[in-house]
Image (tube, rainbow, N blue to C red):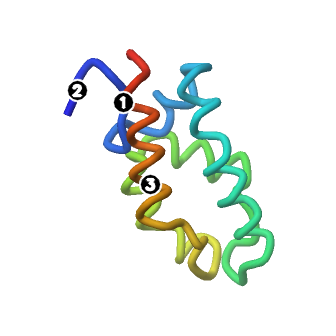
């Protein structure tokens, strides 16, 4: 693991504060927002929820997704591995 590059073990806030990493991460956030709008949980990823999530690692946040949105978001292991690989190419 490259400690000078981003990964799924980094906090969401750090990723979102880096424009290049945020652009790589945006499709996953869009998928979560879409799943939230269809779920029976909290309904959406509100500003308050996003503020709270910024302190969690991506992996921790994803472990909470089913509870937050009322079901699975349909994110595959392959998608996560691909996202991690793309994040690993971006220096902190």
Question: Which residue does the numbered mark 3 point to in the structure image?
Answer: 80
Which of the labelled discs sits on residue 33, or is there none? Answer: none
Q: What residue is shown at x 39% (from left), y 51% (from top)? A: 81
The Cα atoms of the two marked residues, 1 and 2, are separated by: 7 Å
Pick the quarter of the image with the N terminus. top left
Q: Residue 78 placed where, x, y %?
A: 44, 60
Residue found at the far right of this picture? 37
Q: What residue is shown at x 54% (from left), y 47% (from top)? A: 52
Secondary structure at badge 3 equals: helix
Secondary structure at badge 1 equals: loop
Is residue 3 found left or right of 55 in the rendered image?
left
Pick the quarter of the image with the C terminus. top left
Q: Residue 76 placed where, x, y %?
A: 49, 67
Question: Which residue does the numbered mark 1 point to in the structure image?
Answer: 88
Q: Is 83 above or below relative to 59?
A: above
Is residue 42 found left or right of 82 in the rendered image?
right
The Cα atoms of the two marked residues, 1 and 3, are separated by: 12 Å
Which quadrant of the figure has residue 72? bottom right
Badge 1 vs badge 2, beta-carbon distance below 8 Å:
yes
Within-10-Å neighbours for mark 1: few <14, some 14–19, many 20+:
some
Q: Residue 31 placed where, x, y %?
A: 68, 59
Q: What residue is shown at x 48% (from left), y 39% (from top)? A: 12
Within-10-Å neighbours for mark 2: few <14, some 14–19, many 20+:
few
Mark 2 or 3 closer to N-term?
2
Mark 1 or 2 closer to N-term?
2
Which quadrant of the figure has residue 16? top right
Which of the labelled discs sits on residue 2, or is there none? Answer: 2
């Amino acid at each position: 693991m490259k400690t000078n590059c981003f990964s799924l073990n980094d906090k969401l806030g750090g990723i979102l504060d880096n424009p290049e990493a945020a652009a790589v991460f945006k499709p996953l956030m869009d998928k979560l927002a879409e799943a939230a709008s269809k779920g029976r949980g909290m309904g959406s990823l509100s500003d308050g929820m996003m503020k709270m999530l910024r302190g969690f690692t991506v992996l921790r946040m994803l472990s909470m997704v089913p509870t937050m949105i009322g079901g699975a978001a349909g994110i595959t292991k392959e998608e996560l591995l691909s996202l991690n690989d793309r994040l690993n190419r971006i220096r902190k």
